[in-house]
Image: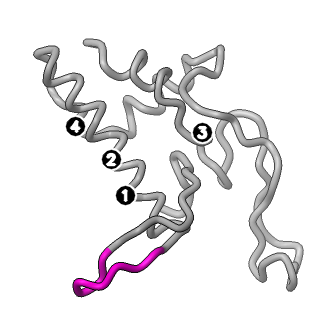
Amino acid sequence: RAYPDVVALAWGTPMYDNGNKVTTGGTSASTPSFAGIVSLLNGIRLDAGLPSLGFLQPRLYAAAAADEKGEMFYDITTGYTNVGGDYYDCGNGFRATSSWDPVTGWGSPRWEGLVAALTVDE
């Protein structure tokens, strides 16, 4: 996919590479960070006798679209992507806007809102 469903800020995240501790950031750290959040949500569901979330995208989009108070995600409304980066801005890319956008998806996760929306039976 070319566009994110959600975003997460992760920088200076410790990881191991061939037994050596290193730090990383960006997608290499934010993707497994959000996967960890989903794993914790699945744990809550399983402890309550509910099935795991399974294929998350349809459920995530339905819950986020119904989240009128913005409790599931921090909506990021400023910033943009561009092909060349900040120094070589060539004018291409997308801008962050209200609600879902191709820069930040739904936004960055809010734990309490995700728990309330995704750990109940449909």
**Mark 4: which secondary structure?**
loop
In terms of image quadrants, where is residue 92? bottom right
* Relative horizontal placement of residue 63, taking residue 96 as reference (left or right): left
In terms of image quadrants, where is residue 83? bottom right
Which residue position holds label 4?
A: 54
Q: Which mark is residue 93?
A: none
* Residue count near mark 4 (Cα–Cα under 10 Å), binned few <14, some 14–19, many ≥20: few
Which residue position holds label 1?
A: 32
Which residue position holds label 2?
A: 36
Looking at the rendered structure, the kind of residue marked 3 is: Trp
Dot 1 or dot 3, earlier in sequence = 1
**Mark 3: which secondary structure?**
loop
Dot 2 or dot 3, earlier in sequence = 2
Part of the protein shown in magenta: 16-23
**Is residue 17 on the magenta stretch?**
yes
Residue at (56% x, 64% y) in the render: 11
Cα–Cα gap, marks 1 and 4: 17 Å
Are the residues at dot 3 and dot 4 in contact (C-beta closer than 8 Å)? Answer: no
Residue lying furthest left: 49
Q: In this view, does 45 lie above or below 13?
A: above
> Which of pointers 2 and 3 indicates the residue nearer the eye?
2
Are the residues at dot 2 and dot 1 in contact (C-beta closer than 8 Å)? Answer: yes
